[in-house]
Amino acid sequence: MNIHVSPQPTDTADDGIAPGGVLMEVRNVSLSFGGVKAITDISFDVRKGEIRAIIGPNGAGKTSMLNVINGFYTPQQGTIVFRGRERRAMKPHHAVRQGIARTFQNVALFKGMSTLDNIMAGRSVLMRRKLFWQMLWHGPALAEEIAHRRVVEEIIDFLEIQHIRRVPVGKLPYGLQKRVELGRALAMEPSLLLLDEPMAGMNLEEKEDMSRFILDVNRQRGTTIALIEHDMGVVMDLSDRVVVLDYGKKIADGPPDEVKSNQQVIDAYLGVAH
Amino acid sequence: MEFLNSILVKPFSDMFAAPDFLIQVLWEGLVAGVLYALIALGFVLIYKSSRIFNFAQGIMVVFAALTLVGLHEKGVPALLAVPMTLGVMFLLAVAIERVVLRPLVNQPDIILFMATIGITLFLVGFGELIFGGENKVMITEQLHIPTGSFEFEPFGGFVSIEQKDVTAVIGAVLLVGGLILFLNRSKMGRAIRALGDDHQAALSVGISLSTIWVLVWFIAGVIALATGIVWGARAGVSFALEVIAFKALPVLMLGGLESVLGAIVGGIAIGVLEKLFEIYWGQPLLGGNTETWFAFVFALIVLLFRPQGLFGERIIERV
Amino acid sequence: MLYRTAGQFKTSYYADHALFPVRQDAMLLGFILLLAFVVFPMTADEFVFKALLVPVLIYALAALGLNILTGFAGQLSLGTGAFMGVGAYACYKLVSIFPEMNIVVAIALSGFFSAAVGVAFGLPSLRIKGFYLAIATLAAQFFLVWLFEKWAWLYNYNSSGAIQVPNIDMFGVTVAGPNASAVVQYYFVLCVVSLITLLSINITRGRIGRIWKSVRDMDIAAELVGINLMKAKLSAFAVSSYIVGIAGALFVFLWRGAAEPVLFDIPLSFRVLFIAIIGGLGSILGNYLGAILIVALPVVISALPSALGLPVSSATVEHLNTMIIGALIIAFLIIEPHGLARFWAIIREKLIMWPFPH
């Protein structure tokens, strides 16, 4: 598979970070809703080119962590450093422009639109033609539309969803919806891809397909991936490093093997009294 | 300077110069506010129990009043016409549940909202077809509602309070009190509130959806009749009353779609404020008739600062 | 067999992005345009122009404007009538201040005024959602109509408080005012409406249309794929109000000939909303189907009793009309919530299959 980068220069293109260098760093982030603490003083980093897993029992603050990283929530304390730039508050659409894309635990697709339109919507940020050209349609707007259509068709081929190109996604089974959502995230050409439980509710075969897609995206496009997943087998196979959260606190961080044998992690999962 | 004076100083100095007139204005606003609150309340009940934004609530007020007067015109004694009108409102509730709500259950909110606009139009056309489109006089005296007025002379001035307005306020307080008791104390009332919190859960513990919907729409019909009698006594009965039905909407914006307390407080606040604004700012400075829009603009401005309304719960967005 | 699509293959993305990928659709449209541009003008009389053809086109345009906001971008508005009023009054002022201005220019410019007012009242949509926003648009409705009444400058201080369209010539032909002929006005409206419809189709099928639909389907997700919600919503308000404003200017200048503030009150807003709903939210074709139904219905209802020899008063006809439209809305929502446009889509599917059942 060879997805070429869009002709327009975006600031996601080359960031001057060598593979293995720190792409994103979470520094002492705390987040609470009213009086309820969701995340307490968490720090970790994501290196360029790796697959980083965030795991933990239900309610550990994993999704909240992703929401902080892509700007949907603003933490009360701490900052996010992405590609050398430090920030605390930002709008989600700015995060996308900087090269952070994500998928969601409960599929967040545009249900009334077709698969093709959903993935094309992922390219909205990369498209430039304004209202005037859109009204005329023939000319620059159409040329742009077709250039992006080519890229999107390659993603559709890659994810093996050609047959559902024109189907409204609301009518698709769950497993395929997850795939379309991954396609939409890929269409944004992110340098950091956040996946929130990409395999929740899938059968074994679908999980294998999804694992293959994730690995291909990582290896062939060099996209850095941070994912949340409950299936420990998948996490241990896919990821390079794992960070473990429990009750909003970080309790372990390291390669899969190391984390697997960490006593605190075992306690958290087996539910030892705190 | 002249301008600032006329909007910031003069209205207030006018208020203090003639406190008796101010009291009169406040009272008028309060009575209007109580009626807005009543309409909003019928609305909140339906929204709480079924998530339906019932645009027809205002038209039900007119329809109920028109039925009452129409029956009396056809020779039915006033005191018999009231229970008969209630019967009509019950039939209406059953019909709405059968014909409109049942086939549309589980449709998106906006579809149900549009359906209530359809109900509104149907009732307008139906009501006018049967009772005629011209303005009618409410049968105030036949219903034994006192029509005199109390007169006071505070601060050496003069205030006149109509007895039917006093009756209206007392009636509204009793109605609201009864309703709150019903919602909190009776089995049916608790079922209605449960339905509002979680449809699926309520169904799974054996609450019958259609019974509750008929009941809720009937209660809304009763409230509509009460409102219709009172408002009709003040302004006559015709589909021009529709305008007050629209007033319930900013009340809902202000109070929150689901809050009984919000409907009451919001209604009274809007009734009083729009009256004050009209008398002290609207008429001298803007050419009057500001009551058509003041409530909406005021609610809109409040909402910009509190998107969930005064009594709504803060929304935490999730993905 | 008429609608056989088999054998029509697309060999390039250009061909796939054509306006009508299916040949028969293009032929059908050609036929309708032939009717509209040639057959109707040759056969219709004054009454048909004034009571059917012109109002259908103008209402369809207004509904198209509303549909962009509500059907495509998902922002419910109950203030369409007032925005039509802004377009009409802006056009009236432009024509009175610059009597030499070409009427087409005046109408095109008046749309910008309603777009500006639309954006101003669209600002709350950034904080307020759903039904709360719908009620907020009523603030625009009531405030603007009040303004039309109280701001005497708008109607040139005349004593009636109404605006009267003067005779306006374009290239030596009277197009608006008491002396204009019905055919000329029909052609004028038809050209404007066709052009705006074409531009709207182009906007809604490209990037901007996708952005609007994303916001409609799930605004949070739209924001998280990088869509700027503020720009998306405000652009929908602007484009929608522009079209609605143009429809308002046509409404007064090319059809009614005069207008009072009360003309733009709530009933007008609702009539346009019904057209959009019955036609189908999120559809362009639907606006025309809805407008035909809503405009033709009262004409049919009033013509029917006299045709059957029944004595029915005009007031009764009006009441019946209101009642039937209410019932129709409910019936449509139950049978097909996506409106007449979806009906056509289903019929078309059947035609493609016909005469085989599967």
Image (tube, coloured by chain):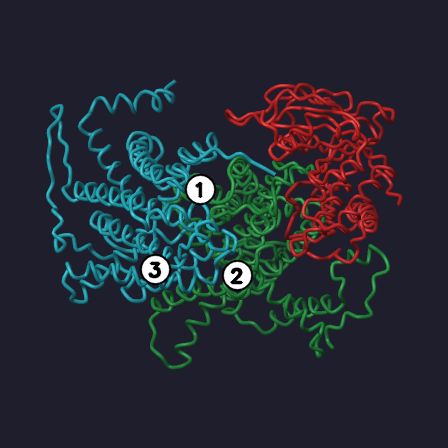
Chain colours: A red, B cyan, C green
Q: Is residue B270 visible?
A: yes
Asked whether, in this view, residue A243 is left or right of residue B19, the answer is right
Which SS class for mark 3? helix
CA separation in Å, label 1 and label 3: 36 Å
Q: If the image is split into quadrants, where does the C terminus of chain C sit?
A: bottom right
Give whichever of C135, C37 is nearer the camera: C135
Q: Return the mark for residue B93.
A: 3
Q: Is residue C181 visible?
A: no
Give whichever of C355, B234 is nearer the camera: C355
Give whichever of B65, B15 is nearer the camera: B65
User: What's the amino acid at mark 1?
Assistant: Leu
User: What's the amino acid at mark 3?
Assistant: Ala
Which SS class for mark 2? helix
CA separation in Å, label 3 and label 2: 25 Å
Residue indicated by mark 1: C144
Which SS class for mark 1? helix
Residue indicated by mark 2: C278
Which chain does tag 1 point to?
C
